[in-house]
Amino acid sequence: MQIVRWLSLGLVVLLAACAREAAAPLDHEAYIWQRQWTPAVAASIETMRGDFAGWRVLAAESTADGGLVDASPQLDLLARSGKPVIAVLRLNGSRPPPAADVLAWRIADIAKTWRDAGVPLSGIEIDHDCATAQLDAYAGLLAQLRPRLPAGLRLSITALPTWIGAPALARLLGEVDASVLQVHAIAAPRAATGEAGLFDAEQARRWIDSYAAVAAKPFRVALPAYGLRVGFDDDGRAVAVESEMDRAIDAEHKRELRVDPREVVVLLSGLKRAHPASLVGTVWFRLPSADDRRAWSASTLHAVIAGATLNADFAARAQTTGEGAADIVLANRGTLDAAPPASIDVVAKDCAAADALAGFRLEKAGQGWQFFPTSDAILRAGRERRIGWMRCASIEKVSVHVYP
């Protein structure tokens, strides 16, 4: 992610700060970004429909040859949800986008197909993370596309913080009805600590205020509800990313990057107190589902949106499996997705055998046993997992030791 040169934006920041007002309520929407919809996606739409005012759904992506390939959303589910829907076209930012004719034809086809299926389609969003130097050309493309949109569709775009301060940004925003400012991105590892990240609440607020000074039309802020596995080269550049889909990463340095929900709450709390007049809401990236292992759980995202207390609440138990054996099960009964506790302690008598499962190791400790996590893999709120098994005459107590 490129660094915005804030010194040149001092006046913009000052004007934006002056434009803050007592905050009107912000509503929430969600990106549904899966290319292939599974039963888990359908379940999430039903479970979380009360949290969101609308959906932004991946409809098509650009290809290397300048064409477009469709995603496969279940239109009947979108129709039944009753929420306004915006179809998103994702265009590769490192390549020239498809021609306006190609985009217009595909958008017309999407609009007809989706509306015929009963989807309340209200707009089109173009997600094109182009270089700042290409903003004029991007604005020209939108100028050609906008008058060719089907009736009743509003045009919006995704905007990057690195565009703030570019002379062409005002022209670009003039070609659309609304925009979505993305405030999450991969940051290179810091030289001093080696830490990398996806989100910083203070920096995100600065971006929002600076963008508001340029964006006279309504905009939303895209907030992260996910994690990534990233490969970096020796210079700290991200060279490969694994997200909702598994992917082999060939890189010198690999890291799991997660966004702490509590840090996003810091930003949301500030926006609830006061925010720019043109900011109308958020869009969460992305809608959780049970088979998306790097997205937040639905429980955590719901708690963040509702302003509920975020905490992990771990409990463990022995679950009899027959023939004198028992599984040791760890559950997170809280609202916060979190790494496992320091240890799970078991008091048992006359154990003939015991072992830990993947992600844990087992040690004998006096009259008992202890299971220790070997990774910081997240246990989602409301979920549980088997961490090991024991074959003992009796298991008298299973407890959680939160702190090392």
Image: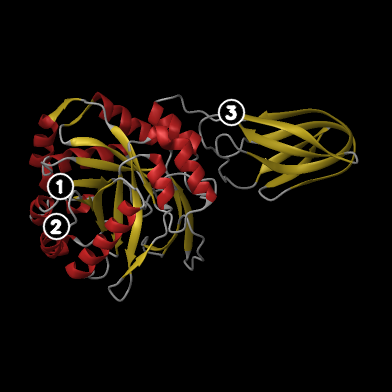
**Quadrant of image for the N terminus:** bottom left
**Closer to the N terminus: mark 1 or mark 3?**
1
**Residue depicted at 11% across the width and 44% down the height:** 214
Q: Quadrant of residue 141?
A: bottom left
**Closer to the N terminus: mark 2 or mark 3?**
2
Q: Quadrant of residue 340?
A: top right
Dot in front, 2 or 3: 2
1 and 3 marks in contact (CB < 8 Å)? no
- Classify mark 1: helix, strand or loop: loop
Crowd around label 1: few <14 · some 14–19 · many ≥20 (10 Å): some
Q: Amino acid at mark 3?
A: Asp
2 and 3 marks in contact (CB < 8 Å)? no
Instruction: Give the residue pinned by disc 1.
Output: 177
**Residue depicted at 64% across the width and 47% down the height:** 374
In depth, the one of 128 and 198 nearer the eye is: 128
Extreme residue toward the front, this view: 116
Q: In x, y percent, where is residue 332?
A: 60, 33
Instruction: Give the residue pinned by disc 3.
Output: 313
**Closer to the N terminus: mark 1 or mark 2?**
2
Q: Is residue 187 visible?
A: no
Crowd around label 2: few <14 · some 14–19 · many ≥20 (10 Å): some
**Quadrant of image for the C terminus:** top right
Structure colour scheme: secondary structure
Q: Quadrant of residue 363?
A: top right
Q: Is residue 168 visible?
A: yes
- Classify mark 2: helix, strand or loop: helix
Q: CA distance from mark 1 to mark 3?
A: 44 Å
Q: CA distance from mark 1 to mark 2?
A: 10 Å
Extreme residue toward the bottom, this view: 65
Q: Please give left or right for residue 341 compared with residue 45 in the image.
A: right
Q: In x, y percent, where is residue 266?
A: 34, 31
Instruction: Give the residue pinned by disc 2.
Output: 146
